[in-house]
Every structure is written in structure tokens, then in C-alpha cells.
Image (cartoon, rainbow, N blue to C red):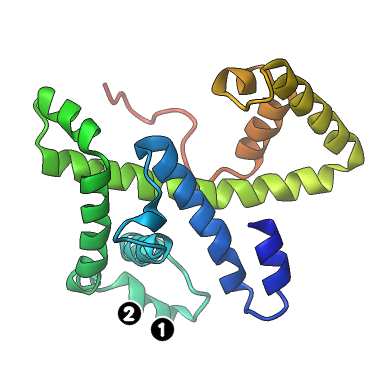
Amino acid sequence: MLKGCESESVFIPVWQSLLPYNKACFNFLTWAFYGVNHADTKLGDKGPTLIALWIFFQLAPLLTLGLPSFLEDPLLHTFRLPPFLVKGSYKKLYDFFYNASGKILDEGEKMGIQREEACHNLLFATCFNSYGGMKILFPSLLKFIGQAGVKLHKQLAEEIRMVVQSNGGTVTMSGMEQMELMKSVVYETLRIDPPVLLQYGKAKKDLV
């Protein structure tokens, strides 16, 4: 992915250089959660583009494009964007998740959750929470690790290589739990630059 971005960065706009990264994030999630490569399905490589359009409609009331308020407020913050404009994109995502998450939907039915409702929740959790968070967190990680300097780079490389070697050359969840410095870097990045800003650290009222 990185080689592709570097070789193409001279010829394409900056925003397009993020497309391979977006595809990699979505591919990781579909493999990790559902054991499916989205590129091999009817959805193809359109997933990140469809997600971006759907999320834009979700966040439009909160977004700012840097325009003067007398233009931005009527365009984004006054009227509800018509859902039919994104209905087709959402349906394509829904069909993909419905076909890819059969076993999970079966478990949901055993718990009394309708398959359609469970599928909508899986789509939201994967595309909005997980994918959206990854798109923000990973660039921040690279930024702060790059700014930290060579000493941290060496320490991270030594810790990760040592743990992976001790686990038979395979990256595992249990192995990552042993990477104390790596976890500290991730948590510190989340503290400094959280994917979702303006969250209260303590509930303002009892939610239970």
C-alpha cells in the first residue's frame, strides 16, 4: 500500500492518495470481523467511497467547510439532507454486510434480534465507529511517532520484533498485549488526539 501511495503521489491529487489507505482499513475490518475480502464480492472496491458518502449525510449538521456562516448554515445546518440521495449507497453496503455476516446474524436471531436490525447495527459499528476511528487514529499515530524521533523508533522496533519472534514469528493479539511501549504510544495518541473530540470524560448524569 505504502509503495503504491509513494509511486502515485506525484501524479494524483492529495485527496486521492488516501484512497489506498482507506481501502486497506476497510479490507482489514471486513477480514477481521467477517472473514471476507470485500474486493472479491459484488461490492468490489467501492466500499470506502460509499461509506464516505453515507457518513457525510450523518455528520452534515456538525460539519464545517470553512465557508462564511451565511452560506454554510443554510446549506448544511438548516435543512435535513434528503435521504434518497444516499439510499442506493447504503443499500449496497447493507447487502454486502447481510451476505458477509451470516453467522453473526444467526447468533443475533438466537438472542431475539431480527436479522435486518442486527445487520444495520453491524454496518454502523463497522463503517462509522471502527472504520471512521481507524481513518483518524492511524494518521495521528504516524504523525506522533514521526515527531518523537529516532530513539522511540528504535525502541518500538526492538520491542515489536522481540515479541513477534518469541511468538513464532506471528503477530497475535496475545503478543500485542505484551508490547507495553507500543500500547503506551497508542494510548498516548488517543489521549492527545482522540478520534472523537468533545467527549465528556465523566458522565454528566447517571445513564444506567
Instruction: Tell me the quarter of the image containing the C terminus.
Output: top left
- Front residue of 115/68: it is 115
In the image, residue 142 above or below residue 181: below
In the image, residue 50 above or below residue 196: below
Position of 170 with respect to 55 (left or right) is right
Residue 74's mark? Answer: 2
In the rendered image, residue 56, in percent from the top left (x then y), is placed at: 37, 65
Residue 53's mark? Answer: none
In the rendered image, residue 104, in percent from the top left (x then y), is placed at: 24, 32
Q: Are marks 2 and 1 in contact (CB under 8 Å)?
A: yes
**Residue at 72% in and 66% down:** 6
Say what secondary structure mark 1 lies in. Answer: helix
Say what secondary structure mark 2 lies in. Answer: helix
Q: Amino acid at mark 2?
A: Pro
Q: Which residue is mark 1?
A: 71
Position of 110 with respect to 27 (left or right) is left
Q: Is residue 196 visible?
A: no
Spatial CA distance of label 2 from label 1 is 6 Å
